[in-house]
Amino acid sequence: MKSNDWDVLISSVQIQEAIRKLGAELTEIYSGKKIVVIPLLKGGFMFAADLVRSMGIDLQIEFLGAASYGEQTRSSGEVRLTLDTTLPLADRDVLLVEDIVDTGLTLAYIQQLIRSRNPASLRTVVLLDKKTRRQVDVDLHECVFSIPDRFVFGYGLDSPGGFGRNLPDIVALKD
Ligand code: 5GP
């Protein structure tokens, strides 16, 4: 895919500035606590890597992986767990870090899974929110950017061909 196939929607400078702000807020919210941060893979890995480095508290990292069957740019809503945590989450303060919420079905599934393990608290931060596409209600505590209903990739998210996760900006496919 060539760079004239996409537009830059959110630049790396805007992303880094917003994440520093969010990291400072979360540092205050969790002050004095030892939390478990769970990036949701694959797309959440880059956002989580920058976010944890902007948080000045003790934290552990666990991973959850989810994928949904579907066409290249639309999810079917049928979610599969591709990777599970190794630490018990009971009585822990859990921060779930997700790249993008579209219909909400993936997040609803993952939140239900974490809640079934009885954490002391669960907070969800999302980098990108496609509000107009929502099919189910999900608890979003912090959402960094609201975006229009366009297929986006870069900064952790993949293009329809499975590449593009290493772009520093978030870009949108041209119609
Ligand atoms: P949902 O279950 O909320 O419909 O979709 C969430 C998942 O679909 C995300 O975790 C992501 O993997 C994928 N997804 C939704 N919209 C986009 C998009 O615009 N770009 C990319 N790369 N993935 C998306």
Image: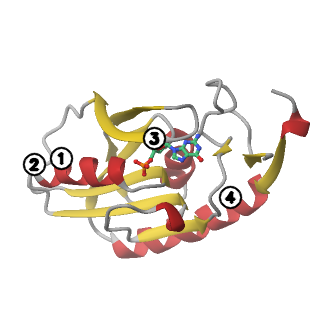
* Residue that mark 2 sits on: 117
**Place of residue 23 in the rendered image (x, y in percent of width and height, measured from the top left):** 51, 65
Report the amino acid beneath label 4.
Gln
Along the line of sight, which residue is nearer the eye, 122 or 109? 109
Q: Are marks 2 and 1 in contact (CB under 8 Å)?
A: yes
* Residue that mark 3 sits on: 75
* Residue that mark 1 sits on: 113
Does residue 56 show up? no
Q: Are marks 3 and 4 in contact (CB under 8 Å)?
A: no
Q: Is ligand 1 less than 8 Å from the beta carbon at label 3?
A: yes
Label 3 Cα crowd, 10 Å radius (few <14 / some 14-19 / many 20+): some
- Viewer-nearest of discs 4 and 1: 1
Please tell me whether mark 3 sits on a helix, a strand or a loop: strand
Report the disc number at residue 16.
Answer: 4
Position above or below: 31 against 97: below
Q: Is ligand 1 less than 8 Å from the beta carbon at label 2?
A: no
Q: Where is the N terminus found, in terms of image quarters?
A: top right
Report the amino acid beneath label 1.
Leu
Residue at image position (60%, 66%) is: 145
Residue at image position (65%, 63%) is: 148
